[in-house]
Amino acid sequence: MGNSEKEFIDEQVRRMQRVRLVISAVVFVITLILVIGLALI
């Protein structure tokens, strides 16, 4: 019981880290596009 519960929590943590990585990547790309756009204007 305790072991499967720990695996479940580990999976949740891994999923959260992946989501955070994707969000930070998207924010980075949007910032890059905004900076390039402002530089071109």
Image (cartoon, rainbow, N blue to C red):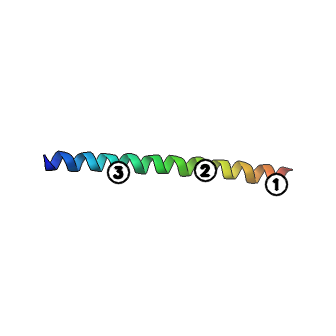
Residue at (28%, 50%) from the top-left corner?
10
Left or right position of 18 against 11: right
* Element type at mark 2: helix
Residue reaching furthest to the right = 41
Which tag, 3 or 1, sits closer to the chain's start?
A: 3
Read off the residue under disc 3.
13
* Element type at mark 1: helix
Residue type pointed to by label 3: Val
Which tag, 2 or 3, sits closer to the chain's start?
A: 3
Mark 1 → mark 2, Cα distance in angstroms: 18 Å
Residue contact between numbered discs 2 and 3, judged by CB atoms under 8 Å: no
Residue at (14%, 50%) from the top-left corner?
2
Read off the residue under disc 2.
27
Mark 2 → mark 3, Cα distance in angstroms: 21 Å
Which tag, 1 or 2, sits closer to the chain's start?
A: 2
How many other residues sit within 10 Å of disc 2, few (<14), some (14-19) or many (≥20)?
few
Residue contact between numbered discs 3 and 1, judged by CB atoms under 8 Å: no
Residue contact between numbered discs 1 and 2, judged by CB atoms under 8 Å: no
Left or right position of 21 against 35: left
Read off the residue under disc 1.
39
Q: Which-is-in-front pick, marks 3 and 1?
A: 3
- Count of residue discs: 3
